Image: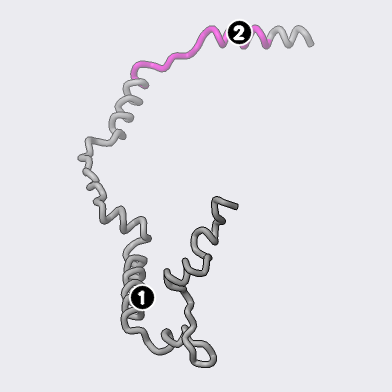
Amino acid sequence: MTQAHDDLDDLFGAVAQRAPLPSDVLMARVMADAVAHQPGLVAVKRVPRAGLWDVILAALGGRGALAGLATATLAGVWIGFAQPLPVAALGLDLTGEVVQLFPDDESFFQNGTGVDGLFGTAEE
């Protein structure tokens, strides 16, 4: 077994010392084929930079989202200006008296529930 192993080592050693080199004709054909497959010069198009409005439009989600936001804004202004009866009725109690949902500045500060009442006073 050792003799066969040594014979193989000698054979592989001899092959490794004699590396085959491709012929000049083969290398010329390979290089000609490589040159034929390379792409030619291509004109590069300049991509226009996105303007400010394009960036804002993309941040909001596109034209559809911007149309929805504009519609909601106009509807809010219209409802706020026209004050339809069902919206005005939200401030009425069951007895028909007006309920003050948001206190005005005077009553807010007179009752002691102002900023000092919310966060405590410095004397405490």
Q: What's the magenta bit mostly, secondary-structure-wise? A: helix
The CA distance from mark 2 to mark 1 is: 89 Å
Dot placed on the residue nearer the N-terminal end, 2 or 1: 2
Amino acid type shown at disc 1: Gly
Could you say which disc has been placed on residue 57 in the image?
none
Q: Position of residue 40 (x, y in %)?
A: 24, 36
Q: In this view, does 95 lie above or below 63?
A: below
Answer above or below: position of 76 versus 41: below
Type of amino acid at the residue the image marks with label 2 = Gly
Instruction: Categorize mark 2 by other alpha carbons within 10 Å: few (<14), some (14-19), many (20+).
Output: few
User: Helix, strand, or loop for circle 2?
Assistant: helix
Residue occupying the point 52% across, 69% down: 111
Which residue reaches farthest right?
1
Q: Which residue was labeled with disc 1?
A: 76
Residue ID at (47%, 86%): 98
Identify the image quadrant of residue 21.
Answer: top left
Tell which tag, 2 or 1, sits nearer the viewer: 1
Which quadrant holds residue 118? bottom right
Which residue is label 2 attached to? Answer: 13
Q: Tell me which residue sits at (49%, 60%) in the image.
A: 115
> 23 or 91, which lies in front?
91
Q: Where is residue 48 in the image (x, y as percent from the top left)?
A: 22, 47
Residue 74: in magenta span: no
The answer to whether residue 29 is above or below residue 124 is above
The magenta stretch is 8-26
In the displayed structure, 30 sits above or below 24; it is: below
